[in-house]
Amino acid sequence: MKMSLHKSALLVVDIQSGLLPVIEHQEQVQEAAAWLLRLAGKLQVPVVVSEHFPEKIGETVPELLALLPPGAERVRKSAFSAVRDGVLEPTAVGRADQVVVTGTEAHVCVLQTVLDLLAAGKQVFVVAEAVGSRRAEDRLLALERMRQAGAVVVCREMVAFEWLERGGTDVFREVLRTLIR
């Protein structure tokens, strides 16, 4: 199963100012999420950002908020799964057949959201370098569990090349020049 530009939404799960500092390899997770946001913006893929108790954990980190494309949606949640509160239903994620996921923590909010998206019949793609946990073992176990449940674990360049579908176009050259090095 391939990712399709016209069927996808990008979901950024809880990359928040009070949580990101304790995430192992936090710089990698934030940079990969930023890369995906830039890609989604260039290709006009809808973006949804969830925030878990932002009044306690903080909002999405400012570096990512600055990259949100026009029309990006932000939702607040209290359940670990963004699906449980029903906040994703009226968003681009609710309308999309495919959901590309980045976020923290891989073994808590990302995992539970992915499992519920799969149960709702979505095709889910988890970007390995764009998810993180406080402990490496927890992240690895979460990726394996999501894979066993039916999510497809991918890297960010898989997302880019599958959304692009072909080379030789102006948008391909722009993505190649600005994002793929």
Image (tube, grey):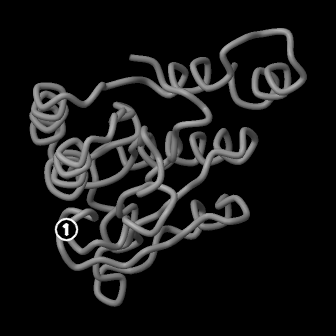
Pick the residue in front: 181 or 108.
108
Circle 1 packing at 10 Å, graded few (<14), some (14-19), many (20+), is: some
| Amino acid at the residue labelled 1 | Arg
Residue 139 placement, left or right of 160: left
Residue 170 placement, left or right of 6: right
| Relative vertical location of residue 12 with respect to residue 154 in this rendering, above or below | below
Residue 164 placement, left or right of 137: right
Pick the residue in front: 145 or 54.
145
Q: Position of residue 161 (x, y in %)?
A: 61, 18
Quarter of the picture containing the N terminus is top left
- The residue wearing badge 1 is 84
Pick the residue in front: 31 or 119.
119
Instruction: Tell which residue pokes out farthest to the right in this image.
Output: 170
Q: In the structure shown, which secondary structural element does the residue marked by tag 1 occupy? A: loop
Residue plotted at (22% across, 41% down): 118
Residue 137 placement, left or right of 30: left
Q: Quadrant of residue 25?
A: top left
Residue plotted at (60% across, 67% down): 65
Q: Quadrant of residue 148?
A: top left
Q: Position of residue 39 (x, y in %)?
A: 66, 39
| Relative vertical location of residue 121 with respect to residue 5 in this rendering, above or below | below
Q: Position of residue 135 (x, y in %)?
A: 15, 45
Residue plotted at (69% across, 19% down): 181
Residue plotted at (17% across, 45% down): 119
Give the number of marks. Answer: 1
Q: Position of residue 114 (x, y in %)?
A: 24, 46
